[in-house]
Amino acid sequence: MQAGTIASSARPRLPRGVRLVHNEAQGGWVLLAPERVFKADAIAHEILKRCTGEATVEEIVDDLAKAFNAPRQRIHDDVTKLIGGLADKKLLELA
Amino acid sequence: MSADNTPLNAPLGLLAELTHRCPLGCPYCSNPLALDQRSDELDTASWARVFREAAGLGVLQVHLSGGEPAARRDLEDIVKAARDAGLYSNLITSAVGVTAERLSVLSDAGLDHVQISIQDSEPQSADHIAGYKGAFARKNALAAEVVKLGLPLTVNVVVHRANIGRVEAMVDLALALGAGRVEIAHVQYYGWALKNRAALMPSREQVERAVGQVEALRAKHYGRIVIDAVVPDYYARFPKPCVGGWGRRSLNVTPAGKVLPCHAAEVIPGLEFWNVRQHSLGDIWRASPAFNAFRGTDWMRQPCKSCALKEKDFGGCRCQAFLLAGDARAADPVCHLSPHRALVAELAAVREDAAYDYRK
């Protein structure tokens, strides 16, 4: 029961029925899915808003490393961990 | 308002019981024994206002339920109103009365997710439990349409003595139908289910086997389907944190507009419920006597009062405490610390293969 390896060429996107919304009363960004609500912290939000089905995992990592001036390997680990975990729960599609 | 100083939570979910009308007659229906009449149902504009007020309170998801929500001709407008209010909408349907054309209109109106109930993996048994010939075939057909439209599908299976031996087959069916999620919900004994308890109650051995199977199936299908389970509490050691705590996370609006902390709350005598026809949802959430009756922990008696888990399970279910122990402030009698625990064991031992008393 562990996340499979995420190909760097995969293009993650939110499937139909999963939406990222901002809600003041719930304290920020939340991911809405069938019968489930996940609070997205600042890092998760930065990753998820780039999961549009356009950018590849590699491009998302590059973009984040540049935007936050952070080590690429660490960003890569964060991104693949989050994406893999969400894909297992059917909250992300890897096109 | 409860006297402890914990801040009031923003609710997450709204269960909108659009109607009590339903073509099926499931003997474990969660609707009350006295059903609201069609003439008393809230109109479209009232539901739209309730949704806007709910969103303003912080509610994120609305569960469009019933009865059968599709029995309402204005379901399309109701779905659109939910979307316009910014809510995530979930249609909880029997599938009877929803054609492929209608589903497509609902999808275009902004529906986010569809949940279809399936009574059993065996067609004949499924139709018998639903009290409706041909229901099983219709459910399968609608599930295919949901998947075709690209909408996420949940299959909900209510588990009891007649189908508890087929948990694996029912999960397989959900997978075959293309569901991304399946709910294995053991019957909770309120309303019609309480009336039919002896005919529905499984044995402890059956329950333990089913719980073990769910664990194994979760591992086997990891990444393919999400399996959520509602555990059968008559055989549990600890109570369930009913609705995540009274007045903490969700609201339930009845077809006639009454707002309840949980769908069964009306069984508790003496509670004063407010109606959306007279009050805003925000006022009801903050100030209605029924919502404040069991909020927080101040209302508790022993053994709950000094229990280390009191902020986790909130003493369990208030309705069950009243129904079985005769006191809504008592510990949920399914808890092993409850002085009434022996009664639950006695009740669970009463199992009769009687004909169902169908919901009508």
Image: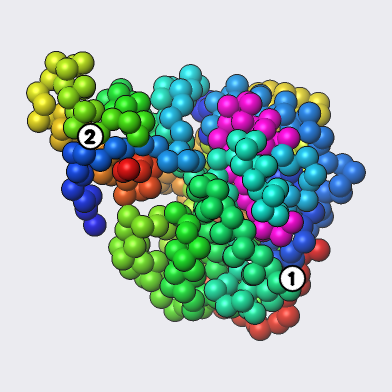
Residue labelled with disc 2: A57
- SS at circle 2: helix
Q: Is residue B320 magenta?
A: no
Name which residue lies at 55% across and 48% down.
Answer: B149
The correct choice, above or below, for B194 with respect to A95 in the image is below
In the foreground, B246 or B41: B41
Q: Quadrant of the C terminus of chain B?
A: bottom right
Identify the chain of the residue marked 2, using the numbered disc in the image.
Answer: A
The correct choice, above or below, for B43 with respect to B232 in the image is above
Circle 2 crowding by C-alpha within 10 Å: few under 14, some 14–19, many from 20 = many
Circle 1 crowding by C-alpha within 10 Å: few under 14, some 14–19, many from 20 = some
In the foreground, A43 or B268: A43
Q: How many marks?
A: 2
- SS at circle 1: loop
Q: In this view, does B37 lie to the left or right of B116?
A: right
> Where is residue B180, by image quadrant?
bottom left
Q: Is residue B84 magenta?
A: yes
Residue furthest right as drawn: B39
Give the magenta-colored segment's residue range: B77-97
Q: Which of marks 2 and 1 is in front?
A: 2
Name which residue lies at 81% across and 26% down.
Answer: B278
Amino acid type at mark 1: Tyr
Residue B115 x/y as whole percent? 57, 52
Amino acid type at mark 2: Val
The answer to whether any part of residue B79 appears in the image is yes
Q: Is residue B345 left or right of residue B322?
A: left
In the foreground, B132 or B150: B150
Q: Is residue A77 left or right of residue B15?
A: left
Residue labelled with disc 1: B132
